[in-house]
Image: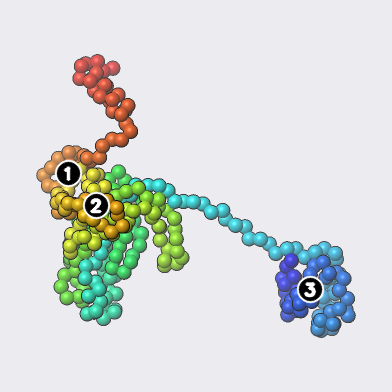
């Protein structure tokens, strides 16, 4: 019952509390008399106005307050393979004890801006800033067949760019990066305002963060899942297996040294990832190739 709005339309909203306290609703409203209104404290002029309005209203009940239409929840999350990059500014905690807060703010802004520009250039998506940490996705919302390669190129450029940032901090700034690839569920937007972020469910972001923790200053560490997709595009150094908190099995890791030079691009980009579930297609392709080599191709 929209009693309050009805009284407001008459300029008599001050009586809403009295109406409700005395149990007056749309059902009894047409039966009210001048004496009834006087008893609950309505002024004479206001009683006259109310009685005229009730007469116009007749026996019709007040319209119920309109219900706001609800927008059905649309589940936009999807299952994807993405490459996750976690980048960290080395020594930021110690730096913050030496610098004025405004100077430290300028350091972080310059660092975050450098990371954002480079990540965007390689088709990545900055999901979240966490102080001196930057979480980025390659493969969401836009996917590319070489997202793993893009993430490593971006990481190499970030490490180089951060080292050139001029700030009030003494010494050279250094970043370190962890990268992992895997299946996740991504797309849910959580939080409000400045805390809004595109959440990822899966162990890939955790692995990227843990690998970043293994990296020395200015270094990039990748997981075996990312290594499998890179072919020979980059020179890598095997770091063996590591027991990582939160993971049951030991994790293999590689350090990215540099991009491979003077190597055929086709050969370098060939992934070591095997074809899975394509036995029939591979056999057919082999048969057709055999026919072509024997001059039987149509």
236 sits left or right of 133 in the view: left
Q: Cβ–Cβ below 8 Å for labels 3 and 1? A: no
Taking 144 as reference, is 201 above or below it?
below
Q: Quick one: label 2, few (<14), some, or many (20+) residues within 10 Å?
A: few
Residue in the foreground of this view, choosing between 96 and 253? 253
* Mark toward the start of the polypeptide (3 vs 2): 3
Q: CA gap, disc 3 to disc 2?
A: 71 Å
Residue in the foreground of this view, choosing between 9 and 204? 204
- Mark 1 falls on what kind of element? loop
- Residue 184 position, x and y percent, is 37, 50
Q: Of circles 2 and 1, which is in front?
A: 2
Q: Of circles 3 and 1, which is in front?
A: 3
Report if residue 276 is visible in the image. yes
Q: Quadrant of residue 272?
A: top left
- Residue 86 position, x and y percent, is 28, 59
- Quarter of the image containing the N terminus? bottom right
- Residue 209 position, x and y percent, is 28, 59
- Mark 2 falls on what kind of element? loop
> Residue shown at 73%/67% (left/top)?
2
Residue corresponding to mark 1: 232
* Mark toward the start of the polypeptide (2 vs 1): 1
Residue corresponding to mark 2: 250
Q: Quick one: label 1, few (<14), some, or many (20+) residues within 10 Å?
A: many
């Amino acid at each position: 019952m929209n009693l309050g709005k009805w009284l407001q339309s008459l300029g008599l909203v001050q009586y809403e509390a009295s109406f409700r306290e005395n149990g007056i609703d749309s059902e009894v409203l047409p039966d009210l008399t001048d004496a009834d209104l006087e008893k609950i404290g309505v002024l004479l002029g206001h009683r006259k106005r109310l009685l005229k309005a009730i007469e116009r209203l007749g026996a019709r009940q007040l319209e119920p307050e309109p219900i706001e239409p609800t927008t059905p929840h649309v589940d936009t999350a999807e299952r994807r393979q993405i490459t996750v990059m976690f980048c960290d500014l080395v020594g930021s905690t110690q730096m913050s004890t030496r610098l004025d807060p405004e100077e430290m703010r300028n350091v972080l802004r310059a660092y975050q801006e450098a990371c954002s520009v480079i990540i965007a250039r390689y088709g990545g998506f900055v999901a979240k800033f966490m102080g001196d940490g930057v979480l980025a996705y390659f493969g969401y919302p836009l996917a590319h067949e070489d997202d793993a390669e893009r993430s490593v190129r971006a990481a190499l450029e970030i490490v180089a760019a951060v080292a050139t940032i001029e700030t009030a901090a003494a010494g050279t700034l250094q970043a370190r990066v962890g990268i992992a690839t895997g299946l996740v569920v991504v797309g849910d937007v959580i939080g409000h305002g400045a805390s809004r972020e595109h959440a990822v469910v899966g162990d890939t972001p955790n692995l990227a963060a843990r690998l970043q923790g293994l990296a020395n200053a200015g270094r990039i560490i990748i997981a075996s899942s990312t290594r499998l997709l890179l072919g020979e595009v980059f020179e890598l150094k095997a770091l063996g297996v590591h027991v990582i908190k939160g993971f049951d099995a030991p994790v293999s890791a590689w350090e990215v040294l540099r991009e491979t030079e003077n190597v055929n691009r086709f050969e370098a980009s060939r992934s070591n990832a095997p074809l899975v579930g394509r036995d029939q297609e591979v056999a057919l392709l082999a048969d057709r190739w055999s026919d072509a080599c024997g001059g039987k191709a149509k």
